[in-house]
Every structure is written in structure tokens, then in C-alpha cells.
Image: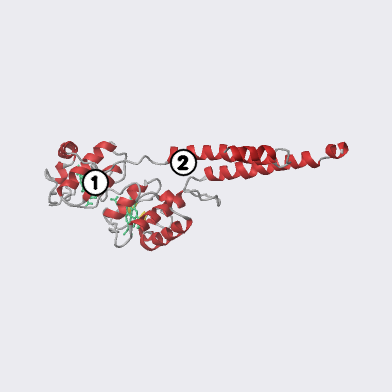
Amino acid sequence: MRFSVRKLSTRRRHPLAGFVVLMLALIVVGGGAYAVQTTALSPASAADDTTSSRELDAGRQLFLIGCASCHGVNAQGIGTKDDKNYGPTLIGVGAAAVDFQVGTGRMPMAQSGPQAPRKTPEYDAEEVRQLSAYIASLAPGPSIPSSEDTDYEAASTEDVREGGEFFRTNCTACHNSVGAGGALPDGRYAPKLDGVSAKHIYEAMLTGPQQMPVFGDSVITPEDKRNVIAYIKAVQDQPNYGGLAGGGLGPVVDGLFTWVVGIGVLVGFAIWIGAHGARVKKKR
Ligand code: HEC
Ligand code: HEC
């Protein structure tokens, strides 16, 4: 450290020294702001899979009150004689299905219809976790994806392009090429994918709600699922006029670039003018 400081001070007279110091300052300030942004935006790593018996009990209580009337007291399902209000068995659907259905507000289903629509969730995040844990305890099934599985912001441009190919092959038939949704027979529909969280997109692929096929990990690997999510998010973030891809942070990276290079160039010009301007020439 001392060495570099001394080195700097011996070269202080050099016409470029001021410029170099300024550039360093710009990078430090800009980089600091960038680091703050990044940590502020990155999701808190949650410990998803901590299931205690208290959690299971709470989940069972919630289930008996809100779900058993359609899905049966032991989640075994209630046979539909004609009444579409009764629900299918939930044994083996896994935590992912519950997290998706309840987290998107589809369940508890309010009234019979061809399809349970997405609505404001009735349960908070903790209750959803308890319900999921309870159903998952009955039989093995797909579990809730980790925050790593759904970290679409880590996808590169190439990943997004690949995700786009998967999407066009597997999803556009129902959801349209930009995820705008579409009608299906019998009054059902594939919803538009605007504003659906990464976790819920992942779970939809994993559990295949209603008409949607199940895209198990052998069909679309976890990494490809993440890429599909990255593609859906990239399409939604448009218009995106060719900004720098910075892990999905968007304008933050562009801002840093402008800050360091843009202002740096301006400062460089100012120093150049100072050194070569008419007044300097007169003095010489
Ligand atoms: C009014 C009846 C009704 C209530 C109440 C209800 N459900 Fe359902 N549920 C259904 C029907 C019908 C389906 C199948 C149709 C569909 O998926 O849209 C279903 C499907 C599901 C599925 C998807 C199953 C699969 O195979 O993927 C899950 C998970 C689920 N319900 C969980 C719940 C939970 C948890 C609750 C309580 C918070 C609940 N449901 C309350 C009627 C109900
Ligand atoms: C055969 C038609 C079909 C295909 C193919 C299909 N889906 Fe779906 N998708 C549906 C239907 C129908 C629903 C609504 C289910 C419901 O409401 O219970 C749905 C729901 C969803 C949801 C939930 C949206 C919301 O509003 O919560 C997501 C996310 C989704 N699909 C993503 C995908 C992805 C990604 C693919 C490709 C890997 C795909 N789907 C392929 C029919 C399809």
C-alpha cells in the first residue's frame, strides 16, 4: 500500500495523474453503489426445507379447515359423482403442487368451474409452507425448487437464447410465443405468464396443473427450466433496447458503465483542454 502511494506521489506532476486518480475514484464510488444495489436485490437465501412436527400439525389444521371439504380429511380426494366441486387426491402431488396452487391463489377453489383462476392468495407465506409440508409428509412428490434452481438472473445471454428454444418447442402451443396465453377447448385457457414468479413458473413445469403437461427433470433438466424462466423474464422485461446484460439487474450495470467511462471521458477532455488550451499556449 505504502509503496503504491509513494509511487503515485512521485508521479503526481505527470499531467495524467489527476485523471488516473479521478478514474479510480469514479470506479470506487460507482462500484460501491453497484455492490450495495446487488446485495439489496439478491434474494435472502431462505431455508426452505425445515419441517418440524409443529409445522406439520399447523399444516394439517389449516388443511382440515380450508381444503378437506373438497380433498377429503386425509387428502385422499372425494369422488366426483357429477359435482365438479369435489377435489382430486393430493397424495403424492408434493409440496411443489401445493405451493403453486395455494401460492398463486388458485386454491382454495372458490366455486366450481372449468378451471381454478389465479387470484390473490388467501394464505400467507408461512401458512403455504405449512400446508405444503403437510401434503409432502403424506407421500413423496416434487418438492419446492430452491432459490438456486430459480436463479434466472444468473443466466447468460446464451442461456436465455436456449431457454427461448425450449419455450418455443414446449410451451408456445398453449401459452403463445411471448407467453401471452391462449384459449383451450371447454372454456379452459392457458394463462398469460406476465408477472408470475420464477418459483411458480418452475413449479408449474414440475407439476403440470390441469391441461398442462408435467415437464419432469428428465424432459427439461433443472438448468433448462431455469433458462426457460430466464427467457420468459427477458421477454417480459422488454422493451429492452440492447442494454448490457448484468445478471438481470438491467440499468444498474449500464449506469456504472456510463458513470465510469462517460464521466471519465469528460474529465479526460477537461484535462486535455487545460493542458492544450489557448491560455496555456499564451503562457508558454
Ligand atoms: C371447493 C373445492 C376445493 C377446495 C376448498 C380446495 N380445492 Fe384444491 N382442488 C379442487 C379441484 C376441483 C382441483 C382440480 C382442478 C384444478 O386443478 O383446477 C383441485 C386441485 C388441487 C391441487 C392440484 C392437484 C394436482 O394433481 O396437481 C392442489 C395441490 C390442491 N388442489 C390443493 C388444495 C389446498 C391446499 C386447498 C386448501 C387450502 C384446496 N386445494 C382447497 C377443489 C378444491
Ligand atoms: C397443453 C397446453 C400447455 C402447455 C404445452 C404448457 N402449458 Fe403452462 N399452462 C397450461 C394451462 C391450462 C395452465 C393453467 C392451469 C391452471 O390454471 O390450473 C398453465 C399454467 C401455467 C403457469 C401458471 C401461470 C399462472 O398464472 O400462475 C405457468 C407459469 C406455465 N403454465 C408455464 C408453462 C411453461 C414454461 C411451459 C413450457 C415448458 C408450459 N406452461 C406449457 C397449459 C399449457
- The secondary structure type at the circle numbered 1 is helix
Q: How far apart are marks 2 and 1 (CA)?
A: 31 Å
- The image's mark for residue 38 is 2
Q: Tell me the crowding category of disc 1: few under 14, some 14 to 19, or many 20 or more residues within 10 angstroms, Cα based.
A: many
54 displayed left or right of 36: left
The residue mark sitting in front, 2 or 1, is 2
Question: Up-down: is 5 above or below 151?
Answer: above
Secondary structure beneath dot 2 equals: helix
Q: Crowding near pointer 2: few (<14 within 10 Å), some, many (20+)?
A: some
Could you tell me residue 191's position as x and y percent? 35, 51
First along the sequence among labels 2 and 1: 2
Q: Nearer the viewer, residue 112 or 75?
A: 75
Can you tell me which quadrant of the image ligand 2 is in? bottom left
Q: Position of residue 182 (x, y in %)?
A: 37, 55
Specify the label residue 98 is tagged with.
1
Quadrant assignment for the N terminus: top right
* Residue 168 in picture, x, y percent from top left: 41, 61
